[in-house]
Image (spheres, coloured by chain):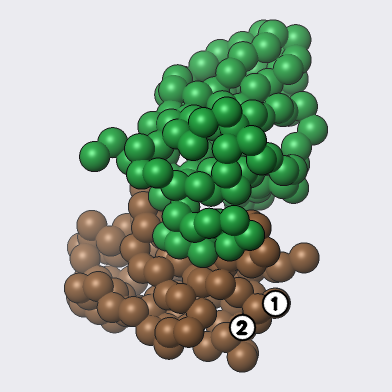
Chain colours: A brown, B green
């Protein structure tokens, strides 16, 4: 069974700081990896999708990388803002299922 | 563009009652799935479907039934509600075909918060 781990579970940073969130997975035969954002009481919003043949994807201040061979992905957030405060989850697609990490809760302090 | 729509958003049931959580998507996605999200447990897959007429069990299927009569709809039925089924339920869909129906981007509904007394 695919295991997905996100470290750290919680992170608090001052506004303006650059930060990195980590995601690791055990089975490298994935179709894709996706990063989501979840605000309290809300659904999951897709941030970035990286196909297995890709190394990275960028959207605005967000950059996600994928290293299939080592089973790792990182989400880089540049110049963090208080509005970035949320829980960030990664998910990998394998077989007919998506496997989720338990998320990193990010707080950006003004 | 509505995306993935879930109803109801909130529901309170008594133990033993049955109900159906509705999920509809207008993106012509073949892959649809139901998850429950509990504190400290993350998202756990209940059931999924790779196309109309095809469903399969996920990690935590007991106490739940699904059917997929159309591409658009994927209802989740609770047969006899138990307090352990108190959770937030999410429906999600993805583009893909056949065996690789989950190779595309996954889109989520807003969730249905269920409380079983």
- From the top left corner, tell me how far across and down residue A37 is, in percent: 38, 57
From the viewer's perspective, is residue B17 above or below residue A48? above
Instruction: Please give the name of the residue rendered at 45% of the width and 20% of the height, measured from the top-left corner.
Output: B8
- Labelled pair 2, 1 in contact (Cβ < 8 Å): yes
Residue drawn 71% across and 68% down?
A: A2
Q: Residues within 10 Å of mark 1 (few under 14, many from 20)?
A: some
Query: What residue is pinned by disc 2?
Result: A71
Q: Chain of mark 2?
A: A
Pick the front one: A29 or B7: A29
Q: Is residue B41 above or below residue B77?
A: below
Q: Which residue is mark 1?
A: A26
Q: Which residue is at the far bottom?
A: A69
Q: CA distance from mark 2 to mark 1?
A: 6 Å
Q: Nearer the viewer, residue A33 or A16?
A: A33
On screen, residue B59 versus residue A45, left or right, reads right
Q: Which label belongs to residue B80?
A: none
Q: Give coordinates of residue B98: x percent, y percent.
A: 59, 56
């Amino acid at each position: 069974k695919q295991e997905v781990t996100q470290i750290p579970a919680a992170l608090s940073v001052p506004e303006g700081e650059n930060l990195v969130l980590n995601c690791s997975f055990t089975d490298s035969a994935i179709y894709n990896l996706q990063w989501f954002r979840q605000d309290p009481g809300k659904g999951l919003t897709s941030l970035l999708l990286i196909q297995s043949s890709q190394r990275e994807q960028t959207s605005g201040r967000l950059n996600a990388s994928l290293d299939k061979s080592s089973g790792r992905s990182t989400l880089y957030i540049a110049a963090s803002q208080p509005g970035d405060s949320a829980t960030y989850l990664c998910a990998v697609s394998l077989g007919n299922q998506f496997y989720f990490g338990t998320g990193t809760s990010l707080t950006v302090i003004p | 563009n509505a995306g993935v729509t879930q109803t109801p958003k909130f529901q309170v049931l008594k133990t033993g009652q049955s109900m159906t959580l509705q999920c509809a998507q207008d993106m012509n996605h073949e892959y649809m799935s139901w998850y429950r999200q509990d504190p400290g447990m993350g998202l756990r897959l209940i059931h999924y479907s790779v196309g109309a007429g095809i469903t399969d069990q996920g990690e935590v299927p007991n106490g739940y039934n699904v059917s997929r009569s159309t591409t658009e709809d994927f209802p989740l039925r609770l047969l006899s509600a138990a307090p352990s089924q108190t959770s937030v339920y999410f429906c999600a869909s993805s583009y893909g075909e056949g065996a690789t129906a989950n190779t595309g981007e996954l889109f989520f509904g807003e969730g249905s918060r269920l409380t079983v007394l």
